[in-house]
Each structure stands twice: as structure tokens, then as C-alpha cells.
Image (tube, coloured by chain):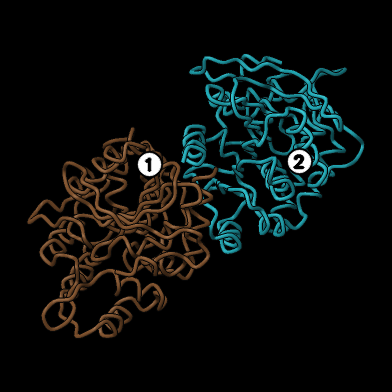
Chain colours: A brown, B cyan
Amino acid sequence: MGSRNMASAASRHDMIMRRIDTGRIALNVREAGDGPLMLFFHGITANSGTLAPLAVRFADRFTAIAVDQRGHGLSDKPDDGYGAADFAEDIAALIRALDRGPAILVGHSLGSRNSVTVAAKYPGLVRSVVAIDFTPFIEAEVFDALESRVNAGDRLFKDLPAVEAYLAGRYPNIPAGAIRIRAETGYHEVDGGLRPLASASAMAQIATGLRADLTQAYREVTRPVLLMRGAESRLVSAEALAETSRLRPDLPVVVVPGADHYVNEVSPDITYRAITNFIEA
Amino acid sequence: MGSRNMASAASRHDMIMRRIDTGRIALNVREAGDGPLMLFFHGITANSGTLAPLAVRFADRFTAIAVDQRGHGLSDKPDDGYGAADFAEDIAALIRALDRGPAILVGHSLGSRNSVTVAAKYPGLVRSVVAIDFTPFIEAEVFDALESRVNAGDRLFKDLPAVEAYLAGRYPNIPAGAIRIRAETGYHEVDGGLRPLASASAMAQIATGLRADLTQAYREVTRPVLLMRGAESRLVSAEALAETSRLRPDLPVVVVPGADHYVNEVSPDITYRAITNFIEA
């Protein structure tokens, strides 16, 4: 699975892969460093590898752990239970199992939704949330397009270059290095080639669940949440972000110029500095 | 001077007024609480009283100190030395004199400019900055209008109600309670009535100095800075803030709906929550 590939060249850390039994579900994680807990949660169809290059940059000061969320990567893939509450309970169980909360949660897309959800429900387990490119008020047609893309990803590929070519087309702004990580960490060998590690049935359920109204969690969350959006995101429109700011004008906002939805992969340095500014203030 | 008036009704703290000799300049402050250092710096023509209601809300967890900056309130008023570097050196000297840095700096307008300036020059003295409604790229005509308002404030008033009537006209969105604080803390008795405590000569020099280019300080500052703007501000335009975000896309932004330039006085609760979200993340 090439965990070595995930570490930033500048980092003195490699990430260790291990499986954590939370008592509720077994989750595969990539982990590095020591200190307060900082957890990273990927988007739909991705896995802990996509956030590992960001996570490892915090390993000097934190126990940085990127998580394969249920249905993804090498974590358990139950037949059902893929709503926001299910993921939030997984995160709560993970923080309790690690016994070193409260944790800083960094989530992209699906992971952002899940992080805010658990922070609203269990404020004592969460120090703060970096919510990357997912907000309430995302338009129905945006979810329609996302659902089509997600469902189209469940294919057989003849080899790794074929996977990379597919991913490069699906994510045109993600640099080649990050595409390679997605290819190397997100697929496994089957008869005739490679298939996604992510469960197709789980992905379909998650895509449906992403449509659920998030306003209550955002209204109620008391822990600090940094709202990050890619200025060119096709998932979070400028209007969806503005509406979220009207709901919670006290939450800080970072809009990353030139980035699409895949903010941390497209603009890793600004993402890192924005998170640092937030958690070091 | 009615320091009791400055404490929020909800707070268990009163602020104590005292004078601190920094070795460089003697500064009058209002102080409450114990813990890490949190300093508050007012805008041009104001004084520590205008930020005391905000400062006192942090006194449960911080040594919260609102400062009369040079030329204002009951602090020293030298004949000259009213540029950004002069104020920044005052803040550095104050933090060193208090011997409990690094400090969180909360600045409004002039105080925001000064706070970012000292953070850029002495990052070791500053934990973070809340920069309220002052940015680079403010338009020349905005400074023209500010300068006119500032210079028109140097008048003799027959009594406190006359001061309050004047201030209510100058700051139409600031609630009566905050207007009263400005009146009670910012004026002193002279023959024939009341005059501003702020030095007219200092105010003129400060107004000129506010026009100096701030882009270098903003480009270079390494400590976290929260950019706050009133959505209805006539000082920081939406375009000036956008240009600042283009210079530093990694800095978090809070735009307070309904607030004009006087964000902390017009919208104290959102200001408090935004600062809390920033410093507790």
C-alpha cells in the first residue's frame, strides 16, 4: 500500500498503518507523531492516504491520525449505517478508544460533515474542527452531480496507470503526486485488474446521506469551526458558504484562491498555513 | 471616570485602572483577571474604556488589559511619535514590562494596525492578533473622510449630555450604553465644560500615519491574525478586505452582519464569540 509514499518529503516522519478496534467498529488508520490528538477524515470514495500528506506535517507537535472511515479503505464495511450519525459515533468511539481527547478534527467533504456532526453532539470530545469544503445549503443539483460521479467510480481497471488516468480526468486540478496517492491507496487487486477499496453499496448510501439537512448541527455546535472553501469549488457554492455565514457569523472563514473542492490536495501549503493559523491562535 | 460602568453586567469582574511605566512611555490601562496575557487596543480618538466591556468578558481565563494608547485617555501624550512603529514599540515595551507574554492582541482600527505591526516585528511577543476593521488597501478618500471626522471632534462641550449627543450623531449605530462609556471615559473637565482627553495634535498626526502602506506588515506577519470586518463598514470596504485576503489567503476572516466600523461596540456578542472561536481552536 506504499505508506512511505504518503509522507511529505519535508517531514521527518513516516506514517504507520494500524487497525484500531473502537469497540463499535474496527478502523484502519495512518498515524505519526506524539502529542495532543489531531484526526483527519477524508471525503467520499477516498481514504486516509489522501489526507496523510497534510496530517504528517502536524506530527512534530501532534498525534496525527488519518482515518479510513467506515466503508472506505481497509476499515470495516458494514452493509448499512452510513448516515451522519453513524460516522459521528465512529469518531466519538475512536477518540474514546485512543483516550487522549479532546481532538482537533480536520475533515474534507464527507469528513467535514462528520466532524461537525460529532462536535455538535459530543463537544467534550472535540477541541475544534477544520471543515473543508462542505457546508449546509449545498444545492440539490450539486448532490445529483456528485452522486453520478461517485457511482461511476465503481469500475474494473486493468492496471495502476489506468486508475491514475481515470482519477486525473475526474480530478483535473489535483497534482500528479496526489493522484498517485489516491491510486496507490484506494484500490486493490482482483481477478482481471484493480477495483476501488471503497464499497460501492456504501458509497451509494453515503451519497444519499450527504443530502440530509445540516443546519441544526451547524447552529448548535459550540466548539470552534473553521470554514474552508475552495474558491473554484463546484460542491460548495459562494452562496452556500454565505448562507452558512449568515447562520453562524461568528465562525471564521478561509476561501482558498484557485482551489476547487479538493482544497487540501490542490493547495496543500495554504491549507496547512490556514489550519496552523486557526489552531495556534 | 466610572470604571464600574465598563464591566459587563454578566461579568464577575471589575476592571482596575492603573498606570504602567514601560520604561519607554507610561500607559494607563484598565485590567481584570488572571492568566495568559490578552491586550486590547482602541481606535483613534477612543480609549481603553471602549474596549473594556469586551476585555472583561475574557477575565475569567486571561489577564485582560485594555490600554490607553499614546496620545489618548490618561496615557502620556508626547508632542510627536505617532506612526505605526511608535505604537508598535509601545506595545512591545508593555508586554516586556508585564513579563507574561506572548500576548493575544485584540485591536480595533488604529489598535488593529498597531497590533499587526508589532506581531510582524516581534513575533516572539505575540501569540495571535484579532484585527478588527482595519486592513491594507483602504482607499484614500476613506482616509480623507476619517481625517475630517477626527479633526472635527476637538471641541468644547457644555456638559456630558452634549458630549453624548455629539457622539450619538457621529456613531449612529453604537448603542446608547457604549456611547455613554465613550462620553464618560473620553472627556475631562476644563474651564467652561468638557474637552476630549485625546490630544488634538496627536490625533492629527495619527490620522496622517494611518495612510501608510501596511502591505509589508501583513505579508510578513507569521503569527495567526483573524481579520474581522463590519459588513456595513465605511472604513474597510469589501474590496479592501478581498485584496487583503488575496495577499494572505491563509488568514481567517469574520464579516459581522449589520455592524459598521465599530464592530465590537455595535455587535459585542458576535465579536466575543468570533474571538473565542479563534483563540480556543
Q: Which mark is residue A92?
A: none
The residue carrying mark 1 is: A103
Total marks in image: 2
The residue carrying mark 2 is: B150
Residue neighbourhood size for the residue with mark 2, other residues' Cα within 10 Å, grouped as few (<14), some (14–19), many (≥20): some
The alpha-carbon separation of the residues under discs 1 and 2 comes to 47 Å
Please provide percent x and percent y for residue A58: 47, 53
Whether residue B137 is visible: no
Q: Which residue lies furthest to the left in this view?
A: A79
Residue at horizontal 11 percent and vertical 80 percent from the top: A191
Mark 1 or 2: the one toward you? 1
Callout 1: residue from which chain? A
Comparing A105 with A109, the one in front is A105
In the image, taking residue A132 as reference, residue B86 lies left or right, namely: right
Residue at horizontal 64 percent and vertical 48 percent from the top: B134
- Secondary structure beneath dot 2 equals helix
